[in-house]
């Protein structure tokens, strides 16, 4: 009897444990077919609907539509549609949600819509005009916020994480009578590509007396060693080494290639051996500039687990380092982000995020306890018709303004903005803080650079700007 009791007790504990795990399991992301969250014969259940205030929401038309009713009350009224239990909608391959709504009441209705995720929500989008009785309208809710991110407004910038969407929110502008609308469809979409501004690639985005100070269109058959290093320290990815063969020029583009290829860092048998090879470009010791407009047209890789970036670090020059400095400390002193220095991450992308989201950041005062940073890892932009993004930094005294495809996407204003000569870097490690594991079957994959251009404003130019030629790769 005692043995039977113990056996039943163990069985009960096991069942209870499985139940507990099931109700507390981490949600699973699901990619909706053709982007449809509602419509396209999808059936929804009552348990996917929630309400706030005096609103009412219910399934309709064989569970294929959502009926929303709002009372004349002036209080908060919302109807929410959520994905099936323990799931998120994974919309990383899209840039907006298009809603198709029919006015199923007697009074006009002006819908107000929002999309929510685990990190935040889109702007609330109000229809441009009221929908009359019996009429149908389409309303698009973009992931990109109407207010560009700025450190002076905590409410600004893109907030949504497109791969963890958990709520569609429905409301309407207040009215004197009852309002009713039927949600016929909600579909994640990529809007039509907007035309790019004419100035892109030709000049900075603001007026001034500007001079082109650096240009590489990669029109030759090899990397220009007068401008770039293809070797350097790898601080980010201990599974990959920099190889000259993985940084190359082809058909007018520079390529940084990440592939499964065992070899030694910097192609030097005395250095660490790793299973992956990758490319690298930087202007350290060759070219620097303080202030100006820095722009590159880049096409990111798509294989999981990769981390391409276009960024800048201080380079105070060889004369900034004391003579007694040990060789391994030289670069640290020249490039530290104390003493007015700052790291600018103009374009930083984790392939897990999909093709439309990337990170912009500023870092200063080291990487340890004094470290400070600002920026956003939810910047949404649409590549051009060839899959490229043209990313730029307008760096002025007390100001860093970031652009993508000619549109301002982030602004940081502070006396702490760097005032130190800096150089440019392109990297393609694996990993990052929020990435997927590598998938060797999808390698090799390339980070492609069409051009790099820099301008300087005449009144900001200094004798330290330009080419220095105090280091090269040729002897390695």
Image (cartoon, helix red, strand yellow):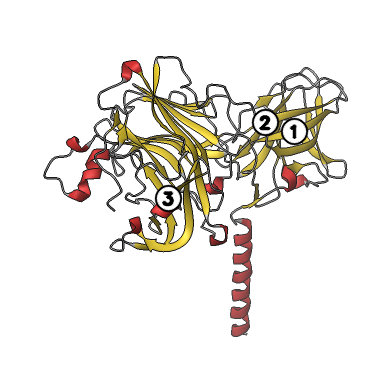
Residue depth check, mark 2 versus mark 3: number of the one nearer the observer: 3
Looking at marks 3 and 1 on the same chain, the residue that comes earlier in the sequence is marked by 1
| Residue holding disc 3 | 279
Q: Position of residue 39 (x, y in %)?
A: 80, 41
Q: Position of residue 92 (x, y in %)?
A: 61, 44
Drawn side of residue 389 relative to residue 104, left or right: left
Do the numbered discs 2 and 1 sit on residues whose CB atoms are within 8 Å?
A: yes
Numbered disc 3: secondary structure? loop
Q: Quadrant of residue 389?
A: top right
| Residue holding disc 1 | 99
Looking at marks 2 and 3 on the same chain, the residue that comes earlier in the sequence is marked by 2
Residue depth check, mark 3 versus mark 1: number of the one nearer the observer: 3
Point 78% across, 17% down: residue = 176
Mark 2 Cα within 10 Å, few/some/many (few <14, many 20+)?
many
Numbered disc 2: secondary structure? strand
| Residue holding disc 2 | 141
């Amino acid at each position: 009897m005692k043995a039977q009791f113990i056996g039943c007790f163990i069985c009960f504990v096991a069942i209870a444990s499985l139940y507990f795990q099931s109700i507390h399991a981490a949600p699973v992301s699901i990619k909706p077919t053709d982007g449809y969250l509602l419509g396209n014969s999808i059936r929804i259940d009552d348990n996917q609907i929630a309400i706030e205030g005096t609103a009412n929401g219910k399934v309709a038309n064989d569970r294929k539509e959502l009926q929303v009713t709002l009372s004349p009350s002036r209080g908060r009224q919302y109807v929410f549609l959520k994905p099936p239990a323990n799931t998120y909608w994974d919309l990383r391959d899209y840039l907006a949600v298009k809603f198709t709504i029919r006015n199923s009441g007697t009074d006009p209705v002006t819908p107000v819509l929002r999309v929510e995720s685990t990190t935040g929500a889109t702007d609330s989008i109000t229809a441009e005009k009221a929908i009359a009785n019996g009429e149908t309208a389409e309303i698009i809710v973009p992931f990109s916020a109407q207010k560009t991110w700025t450190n002076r407004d905590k409410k600004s910038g893109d907030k949504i994480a497109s791969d963890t969407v958990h709520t569609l929110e429905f409301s309407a502008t207040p009215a004197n009578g009852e309002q009713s609308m039927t949600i016929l469809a909600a579909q994640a979409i990529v809007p039509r590509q907007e035309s790019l501004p004419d100035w892109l690639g030709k000049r900075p985005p603001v007026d001034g007396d500007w001079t082109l100070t650096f240009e590489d269109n990669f029109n030759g058959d090899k990397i220009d060693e007068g401008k770039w290093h293809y070797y350097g320290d790898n601080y980010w990815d201990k599974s990959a080494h920099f190889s000259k063969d993985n940084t190359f020029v082809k058909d007018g583009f520079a390529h940084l290639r990440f592939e499964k290829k065992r070899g030694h860092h910097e192609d030097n048998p005395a250095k660490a051996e790793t299973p992956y090879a990758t490319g690298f470009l930087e202007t350290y010791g060759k070219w620097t500039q303080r202030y100006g407009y820095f722009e590159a047209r880049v096409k990111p890789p798509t294989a999981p687990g990769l981390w391409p970036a276009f960024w800048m670090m201080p380079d105070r020059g060889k004369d900034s380092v004391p003579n007694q400095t040990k060789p391994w400390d030289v670069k640290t002193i020249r490039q530290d982000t104390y003493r007015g220095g700052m790291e600018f991450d103009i374009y930083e992308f984790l392939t897990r995020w999909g093709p439309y989201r990337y990170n912009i950041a500023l870092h200063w005062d080291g990487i340890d306890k004094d470290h400070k940073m600002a920026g956003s890892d939810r910047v949404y932009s649409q590549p051009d018709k060839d899959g490229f993004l043209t990313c730029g930094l307008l760096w002025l005294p007390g100001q860093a303004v970031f652009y993508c495809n000619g549109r301002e996407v982030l602004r940081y204003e502070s006396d702490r903005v760097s005032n130190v000569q800096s150089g440019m870097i392109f990297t393609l490690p694996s990993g990052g803080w929020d990435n997927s594991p590598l998938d060797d079957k999808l390698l090799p994959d390339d980070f492609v650079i069409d051009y790099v251009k820099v301008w300087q404003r005449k009144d900001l130019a200094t004798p330290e700007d330009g080419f220095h030629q105090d280091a090269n790769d040729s002897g390695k």
